[in-house]
Image (cartoon, grey):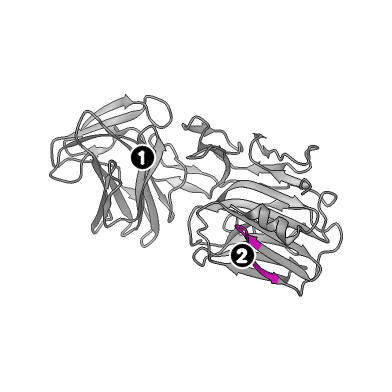
Amino acid sequence: MENPKLALIPSGYKSGKVYSILPTDGVGDFDFSRGSTATRVNKDGLIETVNNNVPRLDWLNSDCPSLLLEPQRTNLVQYSEDFNSWGDSGITVTSNALISPSGDLTADKLQSTANNWRKSDAYTVTNGAEYSVSIYAKLDTSTSTTTTRIEIYRGVDAIASTFNLSTGAISGSISNTFIEDIGNNWYRIGGSYVSNGSTNIFYIYPSSGYSNAGTMFFWGAQVEQGSYPTSYIKTTGNTVTRQKDFIDGAGSSDLFNSLESTFFVEMASFLNAQTNSNGIELAGVGSQNRITLQYDTTNNQIRCDVRVLNSAQAIITTSSFDITNFNKMAITYKLNEVKFYVNGQLISTDTSVNTFAPNTLTEVRSTIAGISGGAFNLQAKIKDLRVYNRVLTQAEAIELTTI
């Protein structure tokens, strides 16, 4: 199989730019924007902050990086690392007692005898909206404590869950709970909940509950509106907002063959059911002509959507794959044939298809229909992206997309 005309395997970048491996003249490089600082997990497994408009190649639990494209989020916890600034009930806090997931001496040790906790300042919420709560925790191996507790006071009631860092067991009333091993015996724990009232409070316990003594290390508390947690957002006395990531502008009409092509992406979503459809596309200027790979609001649904002069030529969907895993997807198109492949399987073929006029397709962009305002921007991790200027054979497409 010949080389693609455009190939992005995330590796090189600078402020405002993600470099593609092919072509080598820069025409296939992506423009990148994000109007704030943000964090990523670097090659050494440490959480680090990068500047505005610097792309994030994230190495979390992987031997090779993926390009992180997240939506805008705000950490509502005003002191994400300083637990001395939280309210308390008898907790002893030892500040900067341990190396944190950032590699700095910024993790706090929390110790209780019984009936003790730390609580955040009350934060403003929208009644009935979904929020995600998370924190990084590590066992104090000099003690027998293995379980911590997260509690959310929702103004009219409280919900809580316990997390056993030794066994991985979780129980309680917080939804979508998780324990994520991030290395060096640190774990990110948390879940999601639906708010009540106008203000909520985040409680943490260095033990399994009200009546138990315990000792544990904590760092990086976060509460954000949304159904899943995103990358860490540091706060030091106020809420902090991380802006969305966005890529576009890779390619030109001279680079792409508008009459026939193959569009391939290996990527993973952050959740199974999208709040809004979002995707990535090979397209022309504006919204009229596009080949889109998108995640839909239906659980685990991936959509192949080909439109010529805004007329739908082929719409093929599948819900047979866990979209939070990295999936390899490809669309091949030419006159009277669109095929959609996922993970080595031909999903379907459409044989009644018009194709684009020559020189129509000009760029790859992380959106649907060129709408860059936010809701339709891709929210995912990209590991590989390619455009071939011909229709790959079925055998080639299956080989390319096989996991």
Where is residue 344? Give x, y as percent.
62, 58
Which of disc 1 and disc 2 is earlier in sequence? 1
**342 part of magenta stretch:** yes
Q: Secondary structure at mark 1?
A: strand
The circle drawn on residue 187 is 1
Q: Neighbour class for label 1 at 10 Å: few (<14), some, many (≥20)?
A: many
Crowd class of label 2 (few under 14; some 14 to 19; many from 20; radius 10 Å): many
Task: From the viewer's perspective, tell me whether residue 116 is left or right of residue 194.
Answer: left
**Magenta span of residues:** 341-349
- Residue 221 x, y percent position in the rendering: 36, 40
Where 38 falls versus 265 (above or below)? above
Residue for badge 2 = 303
Q: Is residue 304 visible?
A: yes
The residue depicted at 49 percent of the width and 39 percent of the height is 60
Residue 106 in the image: x percent, y percent? Answer: 36, 27
Q: Amino acid at mark 2?
A: Arg
